[in-house]
Image (cartoon, grey):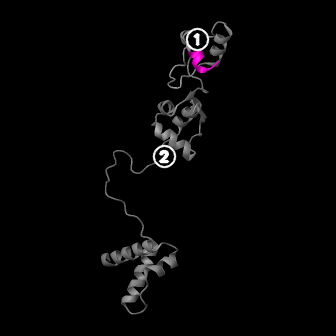
Amino acid sequence: MSDSTWRRRHHKAFAAAVKPLPGSARPLIYDAAQVDAHLAGEPLPTLPSGPHPDDLLTDTEAGAVAGIAASTVRADAVNGLMNRGTERHGRRWWTRAAAVARAGRETQYKGRTAGAKDLVPRSAPTDRRVREVAAIAEAVEAGQARPVTADELAERYGVSTRTAERLMAKADEARRES
């Protein structure tokens, strides 16, 4: 029979007898044993109580279990830090066990810790290429070498012309500072 006929004839009795699983949103999810029992005209078995490791959770529910945002669940799945989940009914689901395992994993270091007092930018080591380009520029000023172009530097270091221009600018800045 078609969906519309089933809804018209049987849905009201089905909805009164079989309740969706707790926490399920659209699409509503039902326990398979309860649905089978209802369709066979048998008494409904009781739902298992408490969380089960194989419960399927949405990204929001998995995030709540793991103590992270739903976007972090999706990002971790893409980056391989969490399993990819399974797709059912046009939606991605993660097991409760995967969410609990993610909750046990330490967060990755993302810069300064909260409450850090040293807010001065940290000095980064100077790129060796900047030092080399500065040495070339000093040799050119001393008349010991011929001037180089950004295209020549790009070919030498295997970078784009724009990156070579940036190296030249940083080398000039480093020479002015010293």
Type of amino acid at the residue the image marks with label 2? Gln
Q: Quick one: label 1, few (<14), some, or many (20+) residues within 10 Å? A: few
In the depicted view, which residue is nearer to us: 44 or 178?
44
SS under mark 1: helix
Q: Which residue is mark 2?
A: 108
In the depicted view, which residue is nearer to us: 178 or 140?
140
Q: Is residue 5 magenta?
A: yes
Q: Which residue is mark 1?
A: 9
Q: Is residue 87 magenta?
A: no
Type of amino acid at the residue the image marks with label 1? Arg
Contact? badges 2 and 1 (CB < 8 Å): no
* Residue 77 sits in quarter: top right
x and y percent of residue 137 in the render?
39, 84
x and y percent of residue 98 in the render?
58, 34
How far is disc 2 from disc 1 in space, using C-alphas? 55 Å
In the rendered image, the vertical position of residue 152 relative to residue 113, given as above or below: below
Q: Which residues are magenta?
A: 1-7
x and y percent of residue 86 in the render?
61, 35
